[in-house]
Amino acid sequence: MAWTQVYDPMGNLGLSALIAAIPIIIIFYLLAVRRSPGQVAGAAAVVAAVLVAILVYKMPVATALTATGIGALYGVFPIFWIVITAIFLYNMTVESGQFEIIKDSVASVTDDRRLQALLIAFAFGAFLEGSAGFGTPVAISAGMLVGLGFNPLYAAGLCLIANTAPVAFGGIGIPIIVAGQVSGLETIKISQMVGRQLPFLSVLIPMYLVVLMAGWKAMLEVLPACVVAGVAFAGFQYFASNFLGPELPDILSSLACIIALAIFLKCWKPANIWRFPGEKPAQSCAGPKGHGYTFGQIMKAWSPFIILTAMVILWGLKPVQTVLDAATIKWVVPGLDKMTIQVAPIMKEATPMAAVFKINYLSAAGTALFFASIISAAILGIGPARFISLLAKTFKQLRKPLITIPCVLGLAYIMNFSGMSSTLGLFLAGTGSYFPFFAPLLGWVGVFLTGSDTSANALFSNLQVITAQQVGVDPVLTVAANSSGGVTGKMISPQSIAVATAATGLVGKEGDLFRFAIFHSIGLAIVVGLMTLLQAYVLTWMIP
């Protein structure tokens, strides 16, 4: 028998929201205060969520357990599949010795750590977000920074914060497309509105990253490079989102940023080369015999990441996606599919929630990375036995994230299917004329819970439309704000934290990374909230 969601089980929305927030409070406490390992925090939070769903929301036990289990499966595939293949590709370059050449080739562009962070964490990470999304940019770029010699905590934290700018248009624009489908608004208008919010952050993020790394004074020394990176990225982000649609902003803006920085750094160098305290001075780019590496050697070393880029782009092409998706296995989940009914005000009319687990084993981004690994192994001379051995080593390296990631995805699913997420959304939506400020925070909560701007838009876009109409604000603004605010929650999502710690060898230190990112996440979310409030009542001409 189908079960209908109840959004105010306590008869008082504030009290219901407080109870719905218990799993979030637990995971915040364990990560930020106790600094517990991610698998402990994730497991405790998901158990608490199941108990609240069953005891308070009166969700049937079987339905609650099934929803949690399907979320955990989604954490294994496609999320963990992306993580393990991304880190496997990186490990391959390290084990083969090619990453030493990569380090020196990056140093030939700049051996300043501040500028390396801009090139890899901000620009290259944004390209991977736009092409693949789902944790790929953090896994690859954070691993690369650690290989270059960055402190692992800083590498992970910088990549999480840098990933703020491109998230809304990640995975070939899928978050914006989903927002349009759920809200019933024109996708191009949502894209345009997001493109009139995020570029302001995109200009600031490069400077923000360098300040975090080295301080205000050190940032001023590379301010010209920060401005070049930020303006190039933000300019193309605005142009593509407003005139081309949601599919290309990340790819075009990241490529523009990489090219602009590379050209600029050929003509300009900072007065001082900044390295981490206690770090040895940079060495010259030299090969085994004291001569510079040849172009062929450098291309061979970079070939895994070049192939990765090519495969990700290929997988993102719609004709290729159509062919690969034909092999998708769809499993209608018994006992969960259409057994949970969403009702007003979350939905315009009573709507059964679908539960179809898709195993898109060919079209998944992780499969693109795995094929890139196979091709790279052939180029790097890694035979089948060594290939399998290295894959097994990578799997062993990630055994704890294999617990953490399914736990946090199980948490996202049980909170969504039980209605707890909707309770939190309705509580924020009850702020009246101040709602434009809280609209981005709704997205922030959604991305924190699910780890995905796409999922947050699917969860709250309809609520954003209904509430905007009630308070007399253009719903295009609030739906866009859901996505723009959501990107600021990505850096502290337990899913993102788990991926970042896995990529940088910080497994068990999830609490430290969470503490590093939490205040930046909240601060940026408030900035987006203030911007949305101004656009709602003062800068209304910015709304398309």
Image (spheres, rainbow, N blue to C red):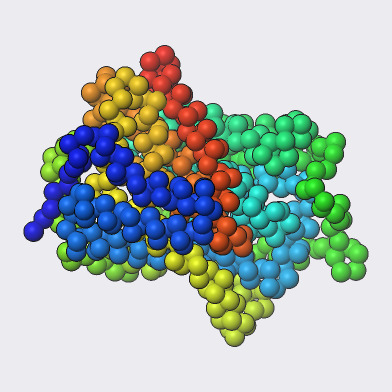
Number of numbered callouts drawn: 0
Residue sticking out furthest to the left? 1
Q: Nearer the viewer, residue 146 or 222?
A: 146
Q: Quadrant of residue 295?
A: bottom right
Residue sticking out furthest to the bottom? 385
Tell me if residue 114 can be seen.
yes
Judge from the rendering whether residue 289 lies leftward or rightward of residue 64; answer left or right: right
Residue 294 drawn at (x, y percent) = 81, 63
* Quarter occupied by the N terminus: bottom left
Q: Nearer the viewer, residue 16 or 129?
A: 16
* Quarter occupied by the C terminus: top left
Tell me if residue 81 can be seen.
no
Q: Residue at x 73, y 71 (%)?
A: 97
Q: Is residue 286 above or below residue 175?
A: below
Q: Residue at x 46, y 42 (%)?
A: 489
Q: Residue at x 17, y 52 (%)?
A: 58
Residue 243 drawn at (x, y percent) = 44, 32
Q: Quadrant of residue 192?
A: top left
Q: Nearer the viewer, residue 485 or 233?
A: 485
Q: Is residue 337 above or below residue 480?
A: below
Residue sticking out furthest to the top? 538
Judge from the rendering whether residue 31 lies leftward or rightward of residue 45; answer left or right: right
Q: Is residue 494 above or below residue 361?
A: above
Q: Nearer the viewer, residue 370 or 298?
A: 370
Residue 308 drawn at (x, y percent) = 56, 61
Q: Residue at x 46, y 23 (%)?
A: 530
Residue 12 drawn at (x, y percent) = 21, 34
Judge from the rendering whether residue 492 lies leftward or rightward of residue 324; answer left or right: right
Residue sticking out furthest to the front? 34
Judge from the rendering whether residue 117 lies leftward or rightward of residue 334; answer left or right: right
